[in-house]
Structures are given as structure tokens and as C-alpha cells.
Amino acid sequence: MTSKRTVLSTMALAVALTAGMTATLASTASAGTTLKASAAEKGRYFGAAVATGKLSDSQYVGILNREFNSVVAENEMKWDATEPQQGRFSYTGGDRLVSHARANGMTVRGHTLLWHAQQPGWAQGLSGSALRNAAINHVTQVATHFRGQIHSWDVVNEAFADGGGGGRRDSNLQRTGNDWIEAAFRAARSADPGAKLCYNDYNTDGVNAKSTGVYNMVRDFKARGVPIDCVGFQSHLGTSLPGDYQANLQRFADLGVDVQITELDVMTGSNQANIYASVTRACLAIARCNGITVWGVRDSDSWRGTDDALLFDRSGNKKAAYNAVLDALNAGSNPPTTPPPGTPDTTAWYLLVNRNSGKALDVYNLATNDGARITQWARNNGNQQQWQFVDSGGGYYRLKSRLSGKVLDVYNFSTTNGGSIVQWSDGNGTNQQFRLADSDGGYVRLINRNSNKVVEVQGASTADGGNIVQYDDWNGSNQQWQLIRIG
Ligand code: G3I
């Protein structure tokens, strides 16, 4: 049976490309009318830092919910807020933000587990192993509390010094030993294996001594297997942007980590809109740039006082900078992510085998009706496990069952995590369209056009009958599928 397997190969891609099937990789114009819609079309998020106290301000919430699909707590997930007394944890603000995000289809960035600033007084008074133990316990407790809710954690914030040395910043944490950062990343990975783990800093926007210090740390972590997935570039900007901004982010991406723009704000003035647009274009040009977060909603919400550094004015109106960002998003290529290892042959039948479980995508109990469950099952090559890619254009495909003739469908156009994947009559709905995103080793994720979430085996089940749902894309092995051509 295995001799009949034909895995999509580089050769298949080459054949497909020569045959002119380049549509999936080509740039496609589109025109979202909000930041989140336009960013989602490009496979990115667009986020804002939120002060939960403002969630009762209707103008603020109106803009937040209309424009953004990612949030980060401006202060409420920091150490002083979450562990005001040693061993006593307080999650009121963080939980409030997470529930607002869930109710409104937003992902959450976690900020920040360890930082030299905004430490509670009791931690400021500790040193040595007492501080190290307290810090690691803090990481474990907070990451465990929010487990499964966080897209990306800023595990460590601002640990490098400004200036020309490129070394670590002196702090109480640094004085516990140079390995405090990797200890924090390892603890965070154990506590929440689903979250991307980021290092986050400022004044690292161009190639300079500080960003090179961070670069060398990330390279070392990757070489030694320290779990790091992403680097955050705060991008608190003045009246100019370093000319090598994109090149700097790209050199980090080339190390095999994602990059994210995490706290963007730009000094008001004649250059503001241009700088916002340039930052947006840089992110879109880097396949591993996941998204952009601005550090607040309206100018009046910003920590920068009179700099008027954000996208909405003090009355909540869109500024020129807003239009510049939206135009840049709309002009970007679509989809911009790393091309999949192969373009599916739309005349073939494939098994989709999950990387984590080794089981195949399966129409449960040979059902042929609308709404029937899709599960995973031990591979048997039956018609209920065979799928054909039907081209929807723009790099998107439906997946048609050989058994039922129905297609994979995100039930009822759900946009929430855990939304069911079923089969349904082919209506070419956006909830029935998926694009392929590359994971390493010849595996792909299937990203839904409507929700921008990926097809996964729920809870990383390895059992027959394990449920298939959609979830935020974190490139988990339960979200990765091998396409095996069998017919
Ligand atoms: O809420 C209290 C208030 O009750 C009290 O009366 C008042 C007295 O000063 O303080 C208020 O808390 C302030 C808090 O913001 C909420 O407004 C803190 O003093 C103030 O220090 C805190 O500032 C935050 C700052 O981080 C702390 O360093 C800013 O809001 C926040 O925007 C800023 O965010 C940082 C990122 O975390 C890391 N990167 C840089 C960025 C900008 O500085």
C-alpha cells in the first residue's frame, strides 16, 4: 500500500510551476475596509494595546472592536499587576481582557512575564536565588493561568542595554545569572506549550549594537534548543525610520523565528503617515512577520502624551496615518506567507495525515449528510479518507470528500477557536475555502478564508474519532497535515 504513496515533492512543485499554476503564489489585489479585515486577508493580525479600564468607554470599544483582531494588556499582565504580593496572584484585569477578546474573535498577546520595570515591591527587594526562584515561579504560574488563551507571550522584555555595547542591561534579574532569560523561556514553554514565546525590546528597530546583541542571543538560543519562537520589535518611533528596518527584521526571521511589531507608535508630524505605511509594508514583505500591534487606540490613550502618536485622534477620528496603514495593507501581496511545499493537483485524491497523531482526516461513520462530523481515524485509504482540492481562486481551495461529494466546512461561519469542522454541500462559501501554509518537513496547515484559523485535531488527540476543529494558527504539530496522493 505504501508503494502507492506519492508525497508532494519539490519536483511536483516545479512541474506545477512550469505548467503555469502560479496563481497561489501571485499577488492578488483586495480592499479591506478595516485594519483587521485587510490584515487578515494578508494572513496577519492587527492589534492594539488596551487599558481594561477603558472597556467601559463606548467610543474606545467601538473603535477597538471594529478595527482590531488582536489585543495586548498595556499594563494588566505585568508582574506588579499579576503578583502584587508574593505567591498571591491577581488576574482580574488580564482575565477581563481575555474574555473581551474571546467574545469578539480577537487573539491575545501576553505582555510581559519578566521585566526589570513594573516589578512588585517585594520582588524589587529580593536578589540571588530567592529572586530567581520567585521569577521562574511567576512565569510558571501566570503562563499556566492563561494557558491556551495567548497567541504570543513576551516572556522577557527589554533585557538589553542601550548604547554601543550590545550587552545585557544591568538589573536585579540579570544579577541572578546570565541564564535567567533561557530559564524563563523554558518555564514558559512547559506551562503553555501552545503559545509562541517572544523576546521583546525597543531601540532594536534598525541594525545597531543593541539589536545585534539580541540577534546573537536568539541565534545562540536556536543553536542550543532554547525554546524561542518570536522576537518583538516595539517600534516606538520618532520622526524617521531606520533605512534598514525591514532588513533588520528579516535577519531575525532568517534565524528561524517569527517577528512581530509589538508596540508601534510614531511621533506626530509630516512624516507620521509615511512611517506608519513603511512599517506596514516591511511587515508584509517578511513572510514570518505575524502582525502589528499599535500601543493604544486614540492619541489620548497613549503613554506618549502630546506626541499624538497613534492612528485615531482624540475624538476617535481616523487620521492620515490610519489611511496610510490601510492602503499599505490593501496593496500588499496576498497571501504573503511562505509558499506551500507543493501546489495540489486538482485532479488527484489525497489523504491528509496529521503530524501529531499519524491519523487521517476522515468522514465519521461513512456519513453522506450535511453537517456530518469530521474526525481523525487510523489510515485505511477508504473513500471517506480521500479528498480532492477544488480551486476557488486566489490560492484558496475547497476539500471535497470522495465518499460524499461534500466539502470541508467551518460550521455556521464560526470565527471562534474550537469551531467545528463538518462536511456540507459545496457552496464555495468562504467558510469552505482553505489555503495551504507551509510547515517544515513537507507538512502544511489549512487556513480558512473566513476565519483565518487553521484546521486542527482538537486537544492534540491521538485517538480514533478525535474531533477536527479550527483554532488560531500556532503551527502546532496537531495543526500540520501531510498530503499523500493516492489517486
Ligand atoms: O493606575 C495608576 C494610578 O492609580 C496612580 O495614581 C498613578 C500614579 O502615577 O499610576 C497609575 O499607573 C500608571 C500606569 O501606567 C497606568 O496608567 C503607572 O504609574 C505608569 O508607570 C504606567 O505606565 C506604563 C508604563 O509602561 C510603565 O513602565 C504605561 O501605561 C505603558 O504604556 C508602558 O508600556 C511600556 C511597555 O510595557 C514596554 N515597552 C515600553 C512601553 C512604553 O513605556
Image (cartoon, helix red, strand yellow):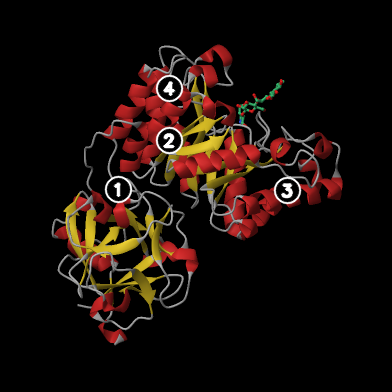
Question: Looking at the picture, how far across and down is residue 195, in whole percent?
Answer: 54, 52
Which numbered dot is residue 311? 4
Which numbered dot is residue 420? none
Q: Between marks 4 and 2, how big is the CA–CA gap?
A: 21 Å
Q: Residues within 10 Å of mark 4 (few under 14, many from 20)?
A: many
Q: Is residue 178 left or right of residue 18?
A: right
Q: Residues within 10 Å of mark 1 (few under 14, many from 20)?
A: some
Marks 2,3: beta carbons within 8 A? no
Q: Quadrant of the N terminus?
A: bottom left
Q: Is residue 60 left or right of residue 470?
A: right
Q: Residue at x 55, y 26 (%)?
A: 54
Residue 250 appears in the picture as rendered:
no
Q: Viewer-proximal residue, 380 or 229?
A: 380
Q: Nearer the viewer, mark 2 or mark 1?
A: 1
Does residue 296 sit above or below 37 in this rendering?
Answer: above
Q: Between marks 3 and 4, how big is the CA–CA gap?
A: 34 Å
Q: Earlier in the sequence, mark 4 or mark 2?
A: 2
Q: Tag 3: residue type?
A: His
Q: Viewer-proximal residue, 24 or 63?
A: 63
Q: Residue at x 46, y 43 (%)?
A: 103
Which numbered dot is residue 246? 2
Does residue 53 sit above or below 345 in this rendering?
Answer: above
Q: Quadrant of the C terminus?
A: bottom left
Is ligand 1 closer than 8 angstroms to the Cβ of mark 4? no
Marks 2,1: beta carbons within 8 A? no
Which numbered dot is residue 450? 1
Circle 2 sits in a helix, a strand or a loop, which is it? Answer: helix
Q: Between marks 2 and 3, how big is the CA–CA gap?
A: 34 Å
Q: Tag 2: residue type?
A: Gln
